[in-house]
């Protein structure tokens, strides 16, 4: 009987100690524990899947980690936001870029074929009020390319491609630029640096990094398809901010120069950003019930330039919305627009491809 009482006393003391420990937990302790238990603090940019903390994870290109810098958790029925800092990001081999207010994306500086394999261990530290808690390590590895990209600015790439012999169709190029336009399905994304542009074909895997105005580094296999194009696109990642692209001014002189360049096989100005206000040259005509083309007077001189769209640029819904706007135009109206420069050979027509309904407005 005496032994039973001793055991009961010990059990009671253990329970009391446990209760005291529980009572001693502050709100900060609870917030930190809740935040550190969340797998969603680390996710893959391309798939949105949680990163497996127990493995060494392969990262490259769009398959890059997005790491939370703040995370909201519920404690006792209330939401609290913990801060998160990450050790192990050297900003040399592994560079961080803001993804949004609460996340960063970390991009490895992937090496060319034969280069070193990059490794990193990134460790979160959670903070709330005056308390911190170190979380578990995340390990990453980035294998080198199986190709050797040649580094060019967009200007040098286009000049060399059309006027030299150092670059040819099928070469793998690494360059940089600013995203100016993109189709809803990302089958066409335009990237420009200075006065030179390249179209990225079917690159939706890298959608995380596409916003108009974003500066990106790109790697792809070069071809000429109505202007320089990367097909396939091998890599896209954020890069240091570049200057705004140089717009094409739609004067008669520039329009005719572009037309002549194109006819001579020089397409380096293709997909260049055009943004201006011009006067409608003639009433639009429907093509099988859709207004897809609008002829405008050049800024100076007697030439014309045409706005054009199709579902491949603006999507089916965008095509309808743009058609409605074009259909409402009359000769003499003033139109504000933004698009990508190109040439329609069968009509000997310099065009501006429209990618979004908001890129054309009738001002009258």
Image (tube, rainbow, N blue to C red):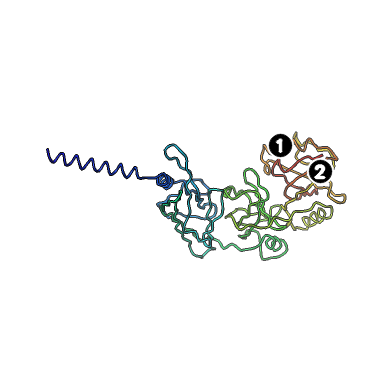
In this view, which residue lies farthest toward the right? 302
**Picture quarter with the C terminus:** top right
Crowd class of label 2 (few under 14; some 14 to 19; many from 20; radius 10 Å):
many
Q: Are marks 2 and 1 in contact (CB under 8 Å)?
A: no
Q: Front-most of 248 and 38?
A: 38
- Distance of label 2 from label 1 (alpha carbons): 18 Å
Q: Position of residue 37 (x, y in %)?
A: 41, 46
* Residue under the point 68% across and 44% down: 313
* Residue under the point 35% across and 45% down: 24
* Residue under the point 64% across and 63% down: 152
Between label 2 and label 1, give the one nearer the viewer.
Answer: 1
| Position of residue 305 in the picture relative to residue 18 (left or right) | right
| Position of residue 333 in the picture relative to residue 232 (left or right) | right
| Position of residue 273 in the picture relative to residue 52 (left or right) | right
**Picture quarter with the N terminus:** top left
Q: What residue is shown with label 1?
A: 321
Secondary structure category for the residue under label 2? strand
Q: Position of residue 136 (x, y in %)?
A: 40, 53
Q: Which mark, residue 205?
A: none
Q: Position of residue 81 (x, y in %)?
A: 48, 45
Count of marks, rendered view: 2
Q: Position of residue 311 (x, y in %)?
A: 68, 40
Q: What residue is shown with label 2?
A: 295
Secondary structure category for the residue under label 1? helix
Of labels 2 and 1, earlier in sequence is 2
Crowd class of label 1 (few under 14; some 14 to 19; many from 20; radius 10 Å):
some
Residue 247, compared with residue 23, is above or below; it is below
Residue 202, compared with residue 195, is above or below; it is above
In this view, which residue lies farthest toward the left? 1
| Residue 359 position by quadrant | top right
């Amino acid at each position: 009987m005496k032994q039973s009482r001793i055991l009961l006393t010990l059990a009671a003391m253990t329970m009391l100690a446990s209760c005291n420990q529980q009572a001693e937990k502050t709100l900060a302790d609870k917030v930190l524990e809740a935040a550190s238990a969340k797998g969603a603090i680390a996710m893959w940019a391309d798939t949105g899947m949680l990163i497996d903390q127990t493995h060494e994870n392969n990262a490259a290109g769009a398959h890059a980690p997005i790491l939370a810098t703040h995370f909201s958790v519920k404690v006792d029925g209330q939401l609290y936001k913990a801060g998160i800092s990450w050790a192990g990001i050297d900003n040399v081999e592994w560079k961080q870029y803001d993804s949004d207010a609460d996340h960063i994306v970390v991009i490895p500086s992937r090496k060319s074929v034969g280069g070193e394999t990059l490794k990193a261990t990134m460790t979160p530290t959670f903070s709330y009020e005056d308390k911190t808690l170190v979380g578990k390590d995340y390990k990453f590895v980035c294998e080198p390319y199986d190709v050797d990209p040649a580094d060019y600015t967009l200007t040098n790439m286009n000049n060399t491609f059309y006027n030299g012999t150092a670059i040819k169709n099928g070469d793998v190029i690494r360059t940089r630029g600013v995203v100016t336009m993109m189709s809803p399905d990302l089958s066409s994304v335009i990237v420009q640096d200075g006065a030179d542009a390249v179209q990225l074909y079917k690159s939706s895997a890298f959608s995380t990094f596409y916003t108009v105005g974003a500066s990106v580094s790109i790697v792809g296999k070069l071809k000429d398809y109505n202007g320089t194009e990367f097909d396939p696109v091998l890599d896209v990642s954020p890069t240091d901010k570049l200057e705004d692209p140089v717009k094409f001014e739609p004067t008669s002189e520039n329009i005719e120069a572009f037309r002549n360049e194109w006819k001579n096989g020089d397409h380096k100005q293709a997909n260049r950003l055009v943004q201006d206000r011009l006067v409608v040259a003639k009433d639009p005509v429907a093509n099988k019930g859709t207004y897809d083309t609008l002829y405008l007077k050049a800024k100076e001189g007697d030439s014309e330039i045409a706005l054009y769209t199709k579902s491949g640029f603006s999507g089916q819904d965008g095509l309808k919305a743009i058609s409605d706007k074009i259909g409402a135009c009359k000769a003499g109206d003033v139109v504000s627009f933004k698009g990508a420069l190109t040439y329609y050979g069968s009509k000997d027509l310099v065009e501006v491809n429209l990618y979004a309904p908001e890129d054309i407005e009738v001002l009258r």
